[in-house]
Amino acid sequence: MDLDTWVRGLVADCSRKEPRFKQLNAWYAIGLPPALAKAEGAPENPRQELDDMWPFSCPDYENPLPTPDIYLPQTCGQLANWLCGMMLKSFETDMSKQKQVTPSSIMSDFELVKFRLQSRSERHHHLLRVDSKPLGHSYVLYLPPGKTNGDYVYHHYQNNCNEAMPFLTLNEWLASPRSRKRGDPCEHINKLREIRWFIGLSQREWIFQTFTLLDTAKVRTFASGKYHDPLGDKPRTLKMGGVDHSTQGQDFMLFRLDPRDFHKNLVDFYGMSGVGAEAARFNLEDLGR
């Protein structure tokens, strides 16, 4: 069982424009999984709150643009928190609080992370949350069961990678083959480690390949930060200075994932949004068997 199919179906449903999916989209956009959406202080009508705030995000709030059909998560950390909250039984979104309560759950030593990855059970699903200060980026790697070798496939979930990178939505990223990785996840950790010391040509190529949809062949002729945005079809400037190798600190959290917890959260999420399980792109009853 590969839960990536569930993730892709969920994200697709959260991005549907039909009126009945407005609340589902709103919970996704503000990054609240069921546990937080039902908590004290959570918005009762998240879609209305997003619509009310919309004028203030427009260039002229007195003459706002038309209200969009859907909203999307705006930051990488918000999206990573939501994915962890949806896929796990529980997740503490406040990293500083997490460090105080269970400091051992957050790893910053690369060799320890690799050891944990290498010693994980091949029979279970795992989720690796990554927070990289040099990249200014947070994202999630989903590691399905299986033997880690050259043919092992795992999944990378992210949206835009800090202000230095082109804007990117999770929907656009999932449509790219780059969201599926092949090989040993420890190689990904090794590449992250290199960013601590310098940003050379090979590191820049890896960053382009791993965190953007840009043509990596163009990086060798990359000059003055100019490139043509394949998504917006217009020239843009990419400031690699936004990737700061002098800023140290990359935190990792590895979780064993139980599909039953993910399934329960899916049922709750569709139910509380008023959509109903029957409208999902997958059969929630079959998933729970």
Image: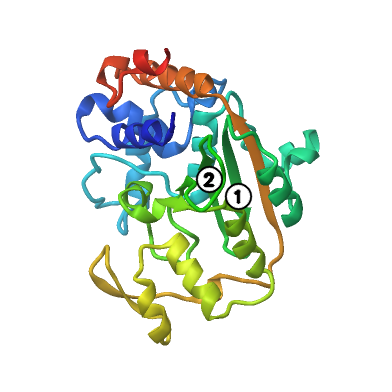
Q: Could you say whether the residue bearing mark 1 is in a helix, strand or loop?
A: strand
* Crowd class of label 2 (few under 14; some 14 to 19; many from 20; radius 10 Å): many
**x%, y% of residue 231?**
27, 62
Tell me: residue 240, above or below residue 159.
below
* Crowd class of label 1 (few under 14; some 14 to 19; many from 20; radius 10 Å): many
Q: Amino acid at mark 1?
A: Val
**x%, y% of residue 139?**
53, 49
Tell me: 31 left or right of 174: right
Residue 179 or 277: which is nearer the viewer?
179
Residue at horizontal 62%, vertical 31%? Answer: 256
Res. 164 visible in picture: no
Res. 261 visible in picture: yes
Residue carrying label 1: 130
Q: Amino acid at mark 2?
A: Val
Tell me: 257 left or right of 94: left
Tell me, yes or no, whether the two marked residues, 1 and 2, touch with CB atoms within 8 Å.
Answer: yes
